[in-house]
Amino acid sequence: MKRRFRLVRSSDFKRVRREGKSFAHPFFVLLFTLSDAENSKAGISISRAVGNAVFRNQKKRQIREILNDLIINVNDNYDIMIIVRHGIKNASFNEIKSALTDMFQRSGIV
């Protein structure tokens, strides 16, 4: 996912967490809120409790790859935050992709 489509500032993450609507799944929580920016942005948060650094980076790379396809189909300009849960430990790439696609459709942002 290109940098212009990423949430990077701590204040943006806090705003999405405070103002955003949320949808839960055993793999992650999806939060989103409308944005004033010219394009949608997404950020990923994963706790140290989920796994070691290698595992966390691997899952973030997988989620970013999935978001490459999803972020261009978002209806309006949203700031999106994905909080990764422990359930993702044994999930394959295809399971994560189908779950994330389903979450985007259920939330109505795609």
Image: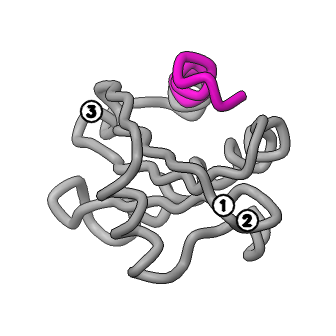
What is the magenta range? 98-110
Crowd class of label 1 (few under 14; some 14 to 19; many from 20; radius 10 Å): many
- For the residues labelled 3 and 2, the Cα–Cα distance comes to 26 Å
| Circles 1, 2 touching at the beta carbon (< 8 Å) | yes
Q: In this view, does 25 lie above or below 30?
A: above
> How far across and how far down the image is residue 69, in percent?
80, 41
Question: Tag 2, which secondary structure?
Answer: helix
First along the sequence among labels 3 and 1: 1
Crowd class of label 3 (few under 14; some 14 to 19; many from 20; radius 10 Å): few
Picture disc at residue 87: 3
The residue to which callout 1 is attached is 41
Q: Which quarter of the picture shows residue 31?
A: top left
The residue to which callout 2 is attached is 5
Mark 3 residue type: Gly
Q: Is residue 70 left or right of residue 21?
A: right
Count of labels in the image: 3
Mark 1 residue type: Lys
